[in-house]
Every structure is written in structure tokens, then in C-alpha cells.
Amino acid sequence: MTLLTDERWHELLERRVADPGAVERAYRDRRRRAALLSPGGTLFLVAADHPARGSLGVGGDPLAMVDRRDLLERLLVALENPAVDGLLGTPDVIEELLLLGALHDKVVIGSMNRGGLAGADWEIDDRFTAYTARALAESRLDGGKMLLRLVNSDPGTVPTLEACANAVSELAANGLMAMVEPLPYDREGGKLVLRKDTASLARAATVASGLGVTSAHTWLKLPAPEDAAVLDSTTLPVVVLGGVPSADPAADLASWGRTLRHDAVRGLVVGRALLYPPDGDVGAAVAAAAKVLEAAK
């Protein structure tokens, strides 16, 4: 069944042209959920902030996320599952889903820094080019997410660190979640390579935990580590990121399941691995992840 029918699609396009004020009304009229966590004490979000920094590929298809109607259809399928608590996205994606009426009673986290375009020379100097803390508060969203890539050899890390610290402080002042995604990288042959060893991931988590004037509203978004010592490094709530999908969805699920059993871990934030599964069945991929989360908690 197609959720984004021709009628809905053309209505969305027409509202974009003829009624830009509809976006502000949609933010204002969205029914907000009372709590971030589900009744079971977990948080399961789908992520769709990749296109805004030019990261469009999935698997062997470098343009998998280019087709916006296709992306929105996949997001509608995912959000239809009641186990999915909400969305992490940039203003364009969030506003499209608001206009489609898909974000009532959902947690909505706005992505903040997308200036570190994938593959750019300045990628690590990740400027804040999307939501601000003030805009998130005024738009009645539930928090802001920031990417913090740590590269010891790249001075672009420094302004990104400072900007993330300021965003954490500003979000806390507005009583909003600050979701920080700290990822340690090295440059190898001119390419950025994620460091997955325990020492690097734990160091990144501790750096992110100390950002801003208070950590009261800070959450960490971390890859599933091999060693629980990474998760033992913080008392902050942690959500597991899906990361770049592997060719083996079952292995991804098993990795998430092991991590979800740790006391500090509260849920999942997964994008391409669920929205673009190898077999194309988004509903089944989302349902499988939901079962793994339920079983772990």
C-alpha cells in the first residue's frame, strides 16, 4: 500500500508554493507527546538528516536518498509503526512530514549542524546550518541533535567542539534534550575512518559528556561498541546509532541488541539501515528493530 499517494504528494507540492505559512501553522498545531520515553522507558527514533550534509548513498547506490518522494514514503511507513517514538531530521524533512500530518504525538528532534558536507575538505569544521536552540524551542520540538567528529590532526575539530558546547548550554536553558553524537575519526589516505576501539570511543563519550554549562539535558548517541567499558564511561542516557548499514542486517540487529541491554542505554536512533534495507521492506526492518529493543528492555 502506498501511503504517499499521488493526491497527497501533489497537495504537498502545491502547499509549498501557495501557502508557505502552512509550515508555521503545522509546527504550532502539532500534538506533542507528554514524555520523551515510551511507557516501557525506551526511545526509538528514525533518522533522516543525512541528505542535508550531502550524504546520499546507501550500499552501492550513491544516490539512494535523492528521491524525496521515495524517502518520505519510507519515513511514513516507519512512523506508522506504533513502536517508533519519533523522528530525527532537518527542517526540510520535518516540515514535509508536518505538512503530511505524520508527526502528531511523536518525539521530534531537530538536527542542528550539517555544514560538514560529506567528502568536503572542511568536513570536520561542522558548522551549525540548520536548527538553532531558539528555533527548536519556538517550533515546539523536543530537542536538538549535533554531530561531533573528533579528529586529533584536524583543527576543524576545535570550532565544532565550541559550537556544540554552546548548543548544549542553549538547549538546556530551554529545557530541551541535547543529543550529542561524538565520533572519533582518523584520516587514512585522505579519507576519514571511524575509530571503533574502546579507548577512542570512551574518550569521545567523556568529551561529549562535559560539554556546556550543564549536562542535565544531555544524551549521547553512540555506535554499538564491542566493549561495555565505553558505556560504563557515562551516567548520561545513551541511544544507539544505526550507522552505515552493513550487508548483513541480522548482524546489525544482534549488535544493537547486545548494546541495548546495558543500563545506560535507552533506545535506538537508526536511519538508512531501516529506511533502505537490502530487501526493500521498510516495515519489516522497523518491526525487527522494535522487537530487538523490546526484548532487551
Image: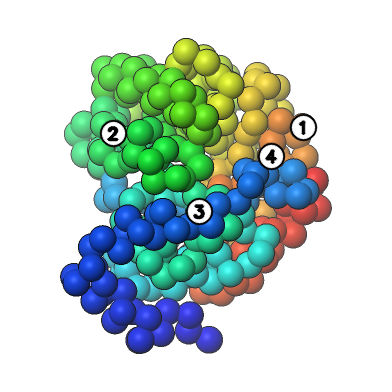
What element does badge 2 sit on? Answer: loop
Q: Is residue 216 left or right of residue 14?
A: right
Name which of mark 3 and mark 2 comes first in the sequence: 3
Give the number of callouts: 4
Give the x, y percent position of residue 249: 61, 60
Question: What amino acid type is highlighted by mark number 4?
Answer: Arg
Question: What amino acid type is highlighted by mark number 3?
Answer: Leu
Name which of mark 3 and mark 4 comes first in the sequence: 3
Q: Residue at image x 48%, y 57%?
A: 30
Residue at the disc numbered 3: 87
Give me the disc on residue 266.
4
Q: Residue at image x 36%, y 49%?
A: 90
Name which of mark 2 and mark 4 comes first in the sequence: 2
Q: Nearer the viewer, residue 142 or 146?
A: 142
Q: Residue at image x 28%, y 33%?
A: 128
Give the x, y percent position of residue 55: 32, 51
Residue at the disc numbered 1: 263
